[in-house]
Image (tube, grey):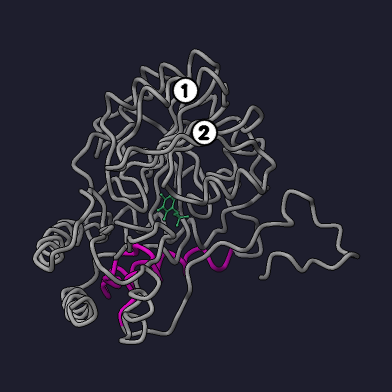
Amino acid sequence: MSNSSWPDWLPIRSNLTGMSAYGAPQLPVAVKLNTNENPFGLEKELVDKILTGIKEKSAALNRYPDRDANQLRALLANFINKLSNTKFDEHNIWAANGSNEIIQSIFLAFGGNGALGFEPSYSVHKIIAQVTNTPWYVVARNADFSLNIPEILAAITKSKPSITFVTTPNNPTGTASGIEELKQIAVQMKKVGGLLVVDEAYAEFSSHLSAATLINEFENVLVIRTMSKAFAFAGVRLGYLVANTQVINAMMIVRLPYHLSSLTQAAAQVALENADLLLGKVAQLRDARDKLITKLEQLGLTVAPTQANFILFTGFKNTSSQLWQGLVDKGVLIRDVGLPSYLRVSVGTEAENDKFISELTSLIK
Ligand SMILES: *Cc1c(COP(=O)(O)O)cnc(C)c1O
């Protein structure tokens, strides 16, 4: 969608006129390492179980779904409790069509006094701020992509945002923030009557403690998770929020009625009942990531320390867009994230990673 050619007759909101649609190019290439998906398809055993789950729901598709997805939310609470040793139940969980919808609902419910983010980070936070006409404040990350805590605390005092976003592990950098830093931000946000939203889309790949462990102590901490990345379930669109029950109650005010289809709920429930099968490749992907880092460093490139299933690298002489295009021409799609002299690659299968490294080697020589 071009962003400057809206016709006069179209009463598009003025805050949208300068915008273009979000999204990485979807190109028909052999090796697709651009959107941080899990590269492994579902095993047949699981496909069969999902089909059975969906079949059981299908005769009742004349009816609306469970509006509040209670069973699914209970399973999500169990999943988080197991991982993080917490005691949540379904009243601490909200589920939606991807964590992007969760982010949108957070803005609709709580964005009144503006939102603060730490860039470079996940650009959808800013885009939804613009779409919902919410003021967007930014504090730049340090040169090594860590959080600039003194500036962040000062910015919170000054702007008094109602929401602050921290993405950890951060996208597109892969770098993670420690729980002590998150606590400092939560305390400061509490002073201004605001919320700290921690986007943990890649938490299953990280060795850091989840911010879900803070929610009991800090009622203003919200944690966003997704089944799109480690869970190998991006096509289903299932994201969720872990938070204080009052936060969840507010999410119910802004959600659309029956937003989560019966089929989505059924598929996600089967996946959670078989979480070990779906998450089985996470350790393998972490090892593959570490191997890929070594190979990039052997090529003389510099890599941001990553806790996710992707790697941001720099140190090549070509421009980012030249190198990106060169790889596309060889059938390898990675991500130009708009950071000059950097590119981001998702960890793929062994064959995909090898192909990426060999094509990269020939292009940067
Ligand atoms: C991929 C990603 C999401 C979106 O995930 P969905 O659940 O598929 O909508 C959210 N946050 C971050 C940081 C991501 O990288």
Ligand 1 contact, mark 1 (Cβ < 8 Å): no
Left or right of 215, for residue 296: left
Q: Which residues are magenta?
A: 31-60
Instruction: Point out the frontmost of discs 1 and 2.
Output: 2
Name the residue carrying label 1: 220
Left or right of 290, for residue 145: right
Q: Residue at x 41, y 47 (%)?
A: 120
Q: Taking 279 as reference, is 248 above or below it?
A: above
- Residue 72 position, x and y percent, is 44, 47
Earlier residue among tags 1 and 2 = 2
Q: Taking 231 as reference, is 84 above or below it?
A: above
Residue 116, disc? 2
SS assignment at label 2: strand
Q: Residues within 10 Å of mark 1 (few under 14, many from 20)?
A: many
Which residue is the extreme one toward the top?
191
Quick one: 47 or 136, which is closer to the camera? 136
SS assignment at label 1: loop
Residue type, label 1: Asn
- Residue 91 position, x and y percent, is 48, 31
Ligand 1 contact, mark 2 (Cβ < 8 Å): no
Residue type, label 2: Leu
